[in-house]
Amino acid sequence: MLVAFENYIKKNKLFSKQDKLLLAVSGGEDSVCLFHLLVKNNYRFSVAHCNFQLRGKESKKDEEFVKTLAKNYHVPFFSIRFDTKKEARKLKAGAQETARKLRYDWFRELLEKYKFDKLITAHHQGDNSETMVINLLRSTGISGLHGIPVNQHQIARPLMFTNREKISRFIHKHRIAFRLDKSNLSDHYLRNAVRHHVMPALKKIEPDIDEVLSAVSGQVMEFEQLAYELIDKEWNNTVQVVERGFKLPFEALHNIRNMEAFLYYKLKDYGFNKTQVEMLSDIENAQVGKKIESPDWELTRERNGYALLKKEEIVAGQTEITSGTKSLDVNGLAIVFKKISPLKVDYKQSGTLFMDISANPFPLNIRPWKKGDRMQPLGMKGSKKISDILTDKKVEHSIRQQQLVIVDKEGNVLSLLPDMISETCKVDSETVKVLSIHIKTPLFAK
């Protein structure tokens, strides 16, 4: 095991004796085995243990066991306790999913704070087999068949050359103590059910099932890497790069043989799931403005395609404009205000609006437009919905949330920035005071 372990690390270039490593240790058979392999091969590492407080006194005993193990071998030790049930309620997720998020968030903090080169986990071929079966049951598609990566960003898994039975033999041969998590004996969790029932049945058919599935996952990963290279090439030929994201014209998308699969594998990078991508055919037939969202991105149906844009934090409040206000920067729009005489009004001045303030309407407010806002455009007798004005101006739905308006004390819209003044405050022959509104930063800049 020692020689195979060292050879596997070197072959896959996982880490070196000079690297500063962080080992995740639960106290169970697998992570304790990995601890001793690292010690015997003289690697430089620290131990990180999470106490999820899900098993009462047993969780506390696990923590004390790992702490003592690290102390006996003079290995630096980090530990943390989580109120996992409370966090699960906050996240509206299961205990296992919550525990995974909590531990990896903490591991990332340790990696950054103490400048570790790699996080080491004790996943092995048996875990990989179980993951592949679970992903099949969950219909995750081809991406789920690559199993658990051996080397992924800052995470290395040096036990992926072996399986649970060989690890157990190593532990018992060297009489190494470890903690037994009795929750792993229950079929309550899907992974345990697969481990206790599905995998033994498969091993009766193919005794080397772990090695077989490990080889399959490697082949799938190679194919997936090739596929993504081709998808990226097609993506670059299809999309138009714009500020904050991309435009996906229908004309270009319809030239792709399997558009739905293409979009699924690419949009995963932006946080969208398969169900959302399947909705795209409905969106294409839906009205302009329909959108689906991921945590950081939104995909909007426009007239001739989709707009994939990174979400912006739009300030929902309003900013006051007083008689003495000279400039403002609102949601990235730089605006300069100046009180002038009607005689100095120059309509040829680029990016400038002129508002009659003879009746001293201050304070005014500038804010994002909202549903229900109306305005009387210059030259019109009646008012019109801002949404309809934006449609007439062909402002795409994906960027409409950025639209700013200027309103008076009663909330009446006096201006639609950057280029419209209401009929109610236009400069005419009776105007004695004018507010010049100069837009220094163009709205909806490309």
Image (spheres, rainbow, N blue to C red):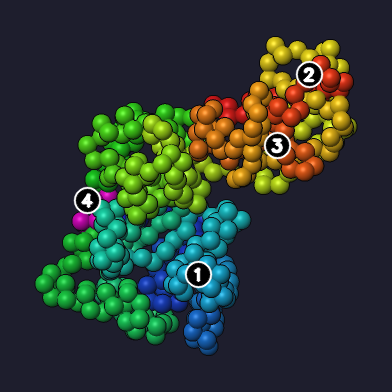
The answer to the question of whether label 3 and label 2 lie on touching residues, with beta carbons closer than 8 A, is: no
Name the element at disc 2: loop
**Residue 64 in view here:** yes
Name the element at disc 4: helix
Q: Which of 134 and 272 is in front in this view?
A: 272
Q: Which one is in front in this view, the residue at disc 2 or the one at disc 1?
A: 2
Disc with the residue nearer the chain's start (3 vs 2)? 3
Task: Give the quadrant of the C terminus.
Answer: top right
Which residue bears the numbered disc 1? 92
**Residue under the point 64% across and 32% down:** 382
Q: Which one is in front in this view, the residue at disc 3 or the one at disc 2?
A: 2
Q: In which quarter of the image is residue 230?
A: top left
Q: Nearer the viewer, residue 20 or 149?
A: 149
Few, some or many residues within 10 Å of mark 4 (<14, 14–19, 20+)? some
Q: Which one is in front in this view, the residue at disc 4 or the one at disc 1?
A: 1
Which residue bears the numbered disc 3? 413
Few, some or many residues within 10 Å of mark 1 (<14, 14–19, 20+)? few
| Magenta segment boundaries in residue numbering | 215-221
Disc with the residue nearer the chain's start (3 vs 4)? 4
Residue 218 among magenta residues: yes
Q: Which one is in front in this view, the residue at disc 4 or the one at disc 2?
A: 2
Which residue bears the numbered disc 2? 428
The answer to the question of whether label 1 and label 3 lie on touching residues, with beta carbons closer than 8 A, is: no
Q: Which of 57 and 341 is in front in this view?
A: 341
At label 4, the amino acid type is: Gln
At label 3, the amino acid type is: Val
At label 2, the amino acid type is: Asp
